[in-house]
């Protein structure tokens, strides 16, 4: 669970911005989106394969420099 303590002389907007950033960093929003609907096993496989391709491509470009 993400907790943000409001500091003295801090506006609500700033505290809310810090809270949303901490939620993003912890992966809460991605997890909620992932569980909003059922994902077929074939779709899950495609998504994982695409992520692996992106990761290997990124690793390839980092090695070339």
Image (tube, rainbow, N blue to C red):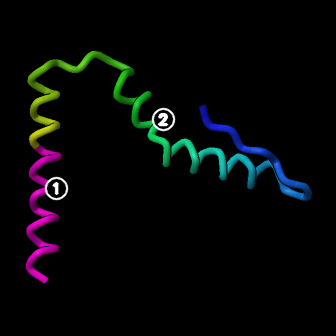
Q: Residues within 10 Å of mark 1 (few under 14, many from 20)?
A: few
Measured Cα–Cα span from mark 1 to mark 2 = 22 Å
> Viewer-proximal residue, 34 or 62?
62
- Dot 2 falls on a residue whose secondary structure is helix
Residue 44, percent from left and from top:
16, 28
Name the residue: 14% across, 65% down.
Answer: 59
Residue 63 located within the stretch drawn in magenta: yes
Mark 1 touching mark 2, by CB under 8 A? no
Name the residue: 8% across, 79% down.
Answer: 64
Q: Main secondary structure of the magenta part?
A: helix
Residue, disc 1: 55
Magenta range is: 50-65
35 sits to left or right of 12: left
**Screen quadrant of the C terminus:** bottom left
Farthest residue to the right: give it: 9
- Dot 1 falls on a residue whose secondary structure is helix
**Screen quadrant of the N terminus:** top right
Residue 50, percent from left and from top:
12, 45
58 sits to left or right of 20: left
Name the residue: 14% across, 27% down.
Answer: 43
Name the residue: 84% across, 53% down.
Answer: 7
Residue 32, percent from left and from top:
44, 28
Residue, disc 2: 28
């Amino acid at each position: 669970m993400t907790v943000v303590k409001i500091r003295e002389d801090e506006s609500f907007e700033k505290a809310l911005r810090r809270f949303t950033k901490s939620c993003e960093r912890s992966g809460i929003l991605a997890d909620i989106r992932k569980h909003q609907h059922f994902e077929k096993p074939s779709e899950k496989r495609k998504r994982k394969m695409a992520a692996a391709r992106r990761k290997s491509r990124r690793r390839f470009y980092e090695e070339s420099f």
